[in-house]
Amino acid sequence: MKSTVLAAILLAAVSSPAASASPFLEPTRFTLDNGMTFLIVERPGRPLVAAVWAVRGGSASDPPGRRGLAHVVEHLLYAGSRTIGTRDWEEEAPLLRRWERLYEQSVRRGAAASGLERVEQRLAALQRPGAYAGVYTRAGALGIDAFTRHDSTAFQTLLPKEKIELWFWMESDRLLEPVFRGFRRELAVVEQERRQRIDSSPAGTWFDLFDAAYWGAGHPYAHSPGGERLEVARLLPADARSHFEATYRPDRLVAVLVGDVSPARARELAKRYFGRLKGAGSRRAAAAEKPAAPEPALGSLEGLCACRSQVEIRYPTVPFAAAGDAVALDVLAGLLNSRSGRLYRELVTGEERVAFAASAEHVSREFGGYFAVRIEAGEGVHLPELTPAWDRLLERVLAGGARDSELKRVRRQLLTDSWRQFEQDAGLAHRLAAAEALGGWRQLTRWLDAAADVSADDLKRVIERYLRPADRAVLSLTRSGSAGR
């Protein structure tokens, strides 16, 4: 999934410098002896507990030639364990090992190995697809899902507060003894998701290509979390196990519980269940430190699309941070967005009137970031008119600055969004997990304080520093059948 702006990850802002109080209760944080971190926000009286755990490792950790591996492992972790998902583990285990050997032979030879289908049929009688989710569903759980992003992978559940011990057992069980059943089936599901997300969208393939051109070959963000089709098809069960061993170490895991659960009870259950996970030092394949990512390659693309003519203008900025220029760029995106923002007022309905729709975002990830503006052409507008219209808008912002009323509007809107999201237990759990995985949950409150101090001069500074025409990359898509529109 595409990362959102830092403001959308943190979803926190203030309406004035004095209003810097955090819109959520401060979590209780503790770390187990094996290195796993827990954040607990107790909210008495809630019928459901939002439980999220995340691993510091997403598609950016995919090895060369195996793009999509992190996403495949996310799917496989729902296949269960030696306890869940099997009718008879003692009988299933040797058959599963045999199937994996035959499957590897098939992939390497490009043809089905003798006996593969027969073993697969025998396994089907012993395995119980969907058993993992079934246990949760029967316990009254909702929202069972997972997400692979560039820098992390997260797993979520909403379950009745009286069933919280079930969550501790279930999640620790699949991390302690995962069994990657249904390998071929999950590869097909991952491919289907890619088709739905990218291939079925008129412009999806072009934006995928633009990402690759922008970041450049070898950059950890040059491919989408969904992976590359041919590389996914060649993945082996051994690849999945290697990724799991290297990435899903306790010291790389963070769990967040929000709801009617006491920190003392959570600590007790965490020690009992997740404390069984072995520390990083005992893992067979320890994850190597990721080298510094290369600079974006800044490529530009032009193409035809069965969509409105449009451009995306992208500028390199800064990695994930909760202060300084990153926050000012987040606020700048807020200034430009919404029906009250500059893009709508000046390019859609204003004197320029060149756009059918327009939006801005600041994407901020662990190893790099960018500021992007997307503009869809209005009726009768030619594609070459869009980028100059954006340049003129930017010049007006620089010349006149951001008015106090505009900055107050942005702060009010972000504050409203913040409270709305944090009031939802699942939303708060996800934001805490994302912040903790990227450097610590206190980045949420630091972002609040930093956003309160963003001024018109700060916006001018980041525009002049980052939004320079010489540094940008542009994707230009012309509607199929039109002449330059």
Image (spheres, helix red, strand yellow):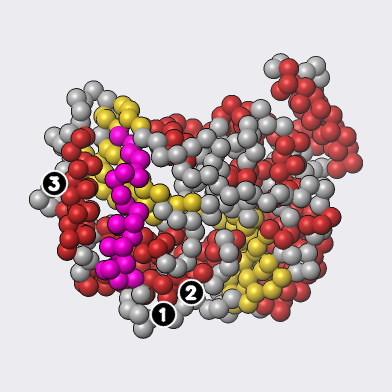
Give the quadrant of residue 225: top right
Q: Is residue 225 left or right of residue 118?
A: left
| Residue 53 screen position, x and y as percent | 63, 60
The residue singled out by tag 3 in the image is 353
Q: Residues within 10 Å of mark 2 (few under 14, many from 20)?
A: many
The reply to whether dot 2 and dot 1 touch (C-beta < 8 Å) is: yes
Give the quadrant of residue 442: bottom right
| Residue 388 screen position, x and y as percent | 19, 43
Any magenta on residue 461? yes
Q: Which residue is found at the position 76% from the left and 50% from the top?
A: 286
Q: Residue furthest left?
A: 351
| Residue 130 screen position, x and y as percent | 67, 44
Q: Quadrant of the C terminus?
A: top left
The residue singled out by tag 2 in the image is 445
Q: Residues within 10 Å of mark 1 (few under 14, many from 20)?
A: some
> Where does the magenta region start and end?
454-476
